[in-house]
Image (cartoon, grey):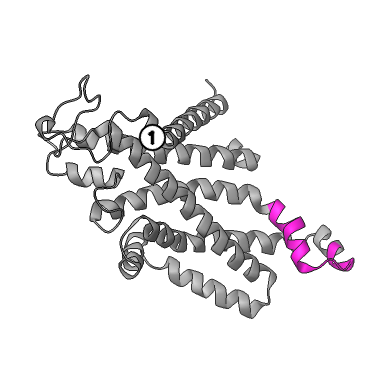
Amino acid sequence: MVPGKTRRFLFSLASLYLLLLAVLAAAAPLVSPYSPTEQFLDRRFHAPGPANFLGTDNFGRDILTRIIYGSRSALLVGIVTVSVALLLGGVIGLAAGMGPPALDSALMLLMDSVLSFPTILLAITIVSFMGYGLVQVMLALGIISSPIFARLIRAETLSIKNEGFIEAARALGTPPVKIVFKHIIPNIMSKVIVQCSLTFAQAVVVESSLSFLGVGIQPPSASWGLMLKDARNYLVQAPWMAIYPGLCLALTVLSFNIIGDYLSERFNPRLGELI
């Protein structure tokens, strides 16, 4: 296959995987063989088999069930994180791009200050102040990711606002708010969509990292990060405890990155020629 067809093929596979994951997450109570917190102490560390397709963990909980319910947490964190980051970053980026230079400098200084901190460290700090839990993790990741959107939207706004059609709209007396929603936002959406897919992947990784460290989603809730945390002491005795949730996490992040790369190529044909 030529590179172009290969990218389309990978994009189709990634989309199919994420669609399947979303369907399983939405229908988790219907497709899961057990409850995610149901314990079978007589089946502790059972290897994959007919009763437990992907095996059981140290509490006798079904790995497949917890992976399915963990996908709910992963996808929900990604959706809320991207939504919060896009809302905050969009408002700040548009205000910086359309506002006076003094406002632009102040807002970008604030965004650069947030970006200067390591992601995991800043996430732990915010969650520590807000408390542990799924809602707190989503809000923290949304705040942390907002500077990326702010800088992207500001840069695109600055490059577009001096175009001829924007100048014509101003000359006709079009209000700034209408210019933003009618002319600027539609012209920057392609790059914003690409950034959404990449931010989604990052949010899934950071959420799993926080749960692994014990400051994210709390037991007995199902989370891929929590599953990896439980598995760290049993890698030799029960390797399936780490293999399957780790594989799901890797495939999910890889799928979003593939989609982001493909969309970036589609929206920027010159980039596709260089790949």
> For the point 58% across and 42% down, which residue is it?
264
In percent of width and height, residue 3 lies at 53, 27
Figure check: 270 above or below 64: below
- Number of marks in the rendered image: 1
Left or right of 218: which side holds 13? right
Q: Which corner quadrant of the image does residue 40 belong to?
A: top left
> For the point 23% across and 33% down, which residue is it?
62
Most distant residue in the bottom direction: 102
Q: Is residue 151 among what the camera can see?
A: no
Query: For the magenta stretch, what is the residue range?
Result: 169-187
> For the point 84% across and 66% down, which residue is it?
174
Q: In terms of depth relative to the viewer, which is nearer, 152 or 72?
A: 72
> In the structure shown, which secondary structural element does the residue marked by tag 1 occupy?
helix
In percent of width and height, residue 84 lies at 51, 59
Amino acid beneath label 1: Ala
Figure check: 165 above or below 35: below
Q: In terms of depth relative to the viewer, which is nearer, 28 or 249?
A: 28
Label 1 sits on residue: 28
**Is most of the magenta stretch helix, strand or loop?**
helix
In percent of width and height, residue 169 lies at 85, 62
In percent of width and height, residue 57 lies at 17, 36
Left or right of 59: which side holds 118? right
Left or right of 111: which side holds 224? left
Is-magenta flag for residue 121? no
